Amino acid sequence: MRVLLVGAGGVGTAVTRIAARRPFFEAMVVADYDLARAEAAVAALGGDARFRAGRVDAGDEAAVAALLERHGCDVLLNATDPRFVMPLFQAARTAGATYVDMAMSLSRPHPERPYEECGVKLGDAQFEQAADWEKAGALAVVGMGVEPGMSDVFARYAADELFDEIEEIGVRDGANLTVDGYDFAPSFSIWTTIEECLNPPVVYEAGRGWFTTEPFSEPEVFDFPEGIGPVECVNVEHEEVLLMPRWVDARRVTFKYGLGEEFVSTLKTLHLLGLDSTEPVTVPGADGPVRVSPRDVVAACLPDPATLGERMHGKTCAGTWVRGVKDGKPREVYLYHVVDNQWSMAEYGSQAVVWQTAVNPVVALELLATGAWSGAGVLGPEAFPARPFLDLLTAYGSPWGMREQ
């Protein structure tokens, strides 16, 4: 396997550090718009000859396809933000490469009823091409991060091994992370966080299909394991709700994120001021007027999440809560994966949130390389057998857990 990794930010850099310990691939080209960032990711690996750095504009489909062909890469792993999903997805198809991402193509709210009906859903643009990928025998594995990704694998595992009938699947994400010296310092890309938190959340119900609610709706307190404890979680737009019903039979699917009151208040203020917008505005500059996106300004004013590891303390938990019936009796479980920031920093030099995101596509790549996972079309993580993934994740030194509720 020869991999083109596009994006050398926090998650991309963590991907290289995790992959460097595994023998399943022949080469990995680490490409970024900022060549110095790609070079730094490769240099940190201590001379592993399988890795090399390159420069590419993730929005330039032709340039990405050419880079895939130049290096003979048969897999493209997308570690950029969701704005670049479609050009990278299409570049992989043009070059005949397998495509893997951690977030799907962007949504657009319904123009008249945004908090009741779906407009363009997450992943719609990719699934529209599913028949063409399948006909060509090509494979795109979409949403293969932690959430979506590992959470979807948990749903597949629950359906196959733990339940006869599933009433509800609810992805629940929470943490007790703190960052020294910052009152507000998101542990993941603020661009992506704004996108998923301020868009109308999507809920799935059998018989009704997908529908939307208002941001931060249906608050609940969820008790997270391994000392994290109770965290208030709210509805947030996320890919799992769009993926799971395609392959897992459940009567209801939700995603709720433990954001905290202060974080929610900050996001609401950004929205009130229009600072969540991606539409460029004109501002004065030293050399004349400059067109800039307000959301990009917000991102530029905040610290890079990849640099916060030394200041972070605590744990992050990603997991899937499932309620249903087994052998005629009610059952309720929480399948989860916890990463302690102290451990991930000591072991990999990557903060907990980006490391937890990065480990899952590397596990998926190894399963594809060995043939344990295979297929054609545009497929979510729950389209594949769960047990090989969960066993390999444990072999990577990061075991998952299950709690009977």
Image (cartoon, rainbow, N blue to C red):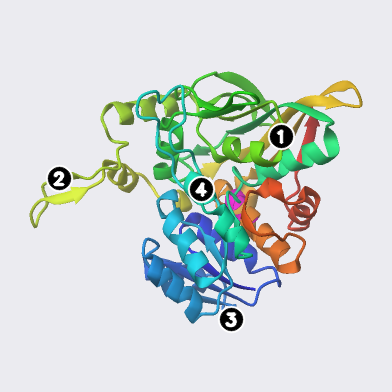
Residue positioned 14% across, 45% down in the render: 283
Point out which mark residue 282 bears. 2
Point out which mark residue 2 bears. none
Name the spot of residue 179 as percent of width and height, x first: 48, 40
Residue marked by disc 3 = 49
Is residue 69 a member of the stretch shown in magenta? no
Secondary element under disc 3, as helix, strand or loop, is: loop
Question: How many angstroms separate mark 4 from mark 2 (CA)?
Answer: 30 Å
Instruction: State left or right for residue 225 relative to residue 165.
Output: left
Looking at the image, tell me whether mark 1 or mark 3 is earlier in sequence order: 3
Name the spot of residue 108 as percent of width and height, x first: 40, 37
Looking at the image, is 193 positioned above or below residue 86?
Answer: above
Secondary element under disc 1, as helix, strand or loop, is: loop
Residue range (magenta): 355-359
Looking at the image, tell me whether mark 4 or mark 3 is earlier in sequence order: 3
Instruction: State left or right for residue 100 relative to residue 163.
Output: left
Is residue 357 a member of the stretch shown in magenta? yes
Say which amino acid is labelled 4. Answer: Met
Foreground disc of the pair 1, 3: 3
Residue marked by disc 4 = 104
Count all numbered tags in the image, as a single digit: 4
| Foreground pick, 156 / 314 | 156
Question: Local crowd at mark 1 within 10 Å, few (<14), some, or many (≥20)?
Answer: few
Foreground disc of the pair 4, 1: 4
Looking at the image, tell me whether mark 2 or mark 1 is earlier in sequence order: 1
Instruction: State left or right for residue 259 relative to residue 299.
Output: right
Residue positioned 79% across, 54% down in the render: 388
Question: How many angstroms separate mark 4 from mark 1 (CA)?
Answer: 30 Å
Residue marked by disc 1 = 226
